[in-house]
Amino acid sequence: MSGAARSARQWRAASAGNGVLFVLIALLIALTLGMAQLEPLFRALFPDLGNPLYARDSFLNLMLAHIGLVLVSSLISVTIGIAAGLFVTRPVGREFEPMVSSLAAIGQTFPPAAVLAIAVPLAGFGFAPTIIALSLYGLLPVIQNTIAGLGTVPQTTLEAARGNGMSRWQILRRVELPLAMRVIIAGIRVSVIINIGTATIGSTVGAKSLGTPLIAGLVGNNLAYVIQGALLVGLLAIVTDLLFERLERRYSFGGQA
Amino acid sequence: MIELQGLTKTYAGKNVVEDVSMTLETGEFGVLIGPSGCGKSTTLKMINRLVPLSSGRIILNGDDVTELPAEQLRRRIGYAIQSTGLFPHWSVARNIATVPQLLKWSKSRIDDRVDELMAMFHLDPAEFRHKYPHQLSGGQAQRVGVARALAADPEVLLMDEPFGAVDPITREALQAEMRRVHGQTGKTIVFVTHDMDEALQLATRIALLNNGRLVQYDRPIEMMVKPADDFVREFFGQADLGLKLLSRRWVHQYQRPPSLTHHATLPGLDHCWRLDEAGRPIVLEGARLDDQHQHTDVRSEWIATPEMSMKEALSRMVWYRVMVLPVVDETGKLVGEVGMQGIMGIESNGGLHAGGPAS
């Protein structure tokens, strides 16, 4: 009875969440494909501007390039971050934990623009230096949360796993990772959201992204361009965040919910 | 059968467990007990090598398993711990199936085994199979923990203060259940506790440890009546030794035929049971402390069963102020009685050595 009531309540909450998510996704797609339809609006808002709609590239191309940058860099941060987090929580790598944590923390304290400035002479202009900067920048939350997530697995659970005859690998795969997953995903969520915002700066070194109209608008004193770029970046970040929230919820067990 | 030979654990040059040797025959319920820090838990964990041995050997049913890979050894030995250690992300059924899955049993065999164990612990499979640990009460979770430890039919079951974290009422129920399951499965069990009453409830053998050494290893009654030294005597507590003895005695050992007619041979103890047509006791005539001729309606609160401990029977006599309790079978039929003078009678003529372990 109470179980049924609870699941009905959860279902209603979930479907309300779904509604918001679908509206935002629809808005994101509509704006990406149909920004040109809003030209009269921008013209009315900014009558002084000769060119109130960014038209040097399609917003669809910019969006795909932006997502590409974020995907590739996040994939790199997540792979390296989880691997490093796992390494320093195993008996062999335990002594490296302080070093890895502080390295990742230092990576985070560099302003992304500074990382870009360092990366350009090494990797040239465009895609590559941006990926380096974003990957480094997104590393810390993943490493931190991997370590923290594995740390939340109760000692008694680990003792029970060992006492029931699981090997180290089985404990990691069947017990530690599933129980740590929620916290690890929270780290990936932060990392990806940071990278969605930071990827705009990549346009200063020639990487195509939603930052391109933004930077162009700032340089050319065209507020309409800035709004168009920022609107799409903001929406993309919100939608991604909501998607991650749903993913995290799948990994909550009992008391953690 | 499990044999521990000279188990020793050294931490930082100090022996926390020193030369512990004992043999537990198949089907025995061995309890390791002692003050905190005596090494009882460490000794237990050396058996499944959660704590590596510094020296000593472990023989399981004749096999020397000291050198066996730890994971293989642990799949032959059940392990249940305090606060259960259930995997919070797995359902009850999957938790119970942990070791069978590691041993790669077929799915149907695992399902059958899970149902069998849930039935043994009175957990309705339809209701509990798909529940998660956080949806269980403390007692239910602890039952699942023990069921998991028994899942692959291990040769020995190790239990590390498994009922340490539950409330006293649940704890008593779990102890009774453990006695039943032990009787039903005939498992060899090694059980760690610091609670003497729990040890006396469950043990067929008690190993008392102090400062990492085995002080005495014997049947519970022997330890009480023939303590090896003052430490043992003190640990078992002289003050209520009599009551502790009674907690190891069962009503069926003291039971005598019920008195169904009045006879005045025992002045002051003359009494008689009135039964209903099904043979259930309804009225007790006499045998009250306050009024010898009073008729008392029999109440379920002071009925005894053959499996009840004599400590509990005595407690009921005192609390309800009756000199004699009716003993009834499962259907409620009167099969005997047990009285105050019966307790004294047996204890005074050499009864100290009469009682064996719980059978």
Image (cartoon, helix red, strand yellow):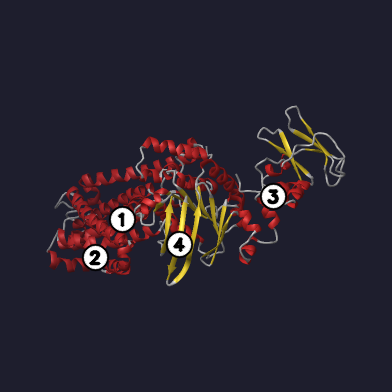
Comparing A14 with B346, the one in front is: B346
Label 4 and label 3 in one chain: yes
Q: Which amino acid type is shown beneath numbered disc 4?
A: Leu
The span from disc 1 to disc 2 (Cα, nearest Å) is 18 Å
Binning the other alpha carbons within 10 Å of mark 3 as few (below 14), some (14 to 19) or many (20 upward) gives some
Comparing B5 with B262, the one in front is: B5
Binning the other alpha carbons within 10 Å of mark 2 as few (below 14), some (14 to 19) or many (20 upward) gives many
Please, what secondary structure does the residue beneath circle 4 have? strand
Which disc, if any, is residue B311?
3
The span from disc 2 to disc 4 (Cα, nearest Å) is 59 Å
- Is residue B294 visible in the rendered image? The answer is yes
Q: Residue furthest bottom?
A: B13
Q: Which amino acid type is shown beneath numbered disc 3?
A: Lys
The span from disc 3 to disc 2 (Cα, nearest Å) is 76 Å
Mark 3 chain: B
Instruction: Mark 3 vs mark 2: give the one in front.
Output: 3
Q: Which of marks 3 and 4 precedes in the sequence?
A: 4
Q: Quadrant of the C terminus of chain B?
A: top right
Q: Which amino acid type is shown beneath numbered disc 2?
A: Pro
Binning the other alpha carbons within 10 Å of mark 1 as few (below 14), some (14 to 19) or many (20 upward) gives many
Which disc, if any, is residue A112?
2
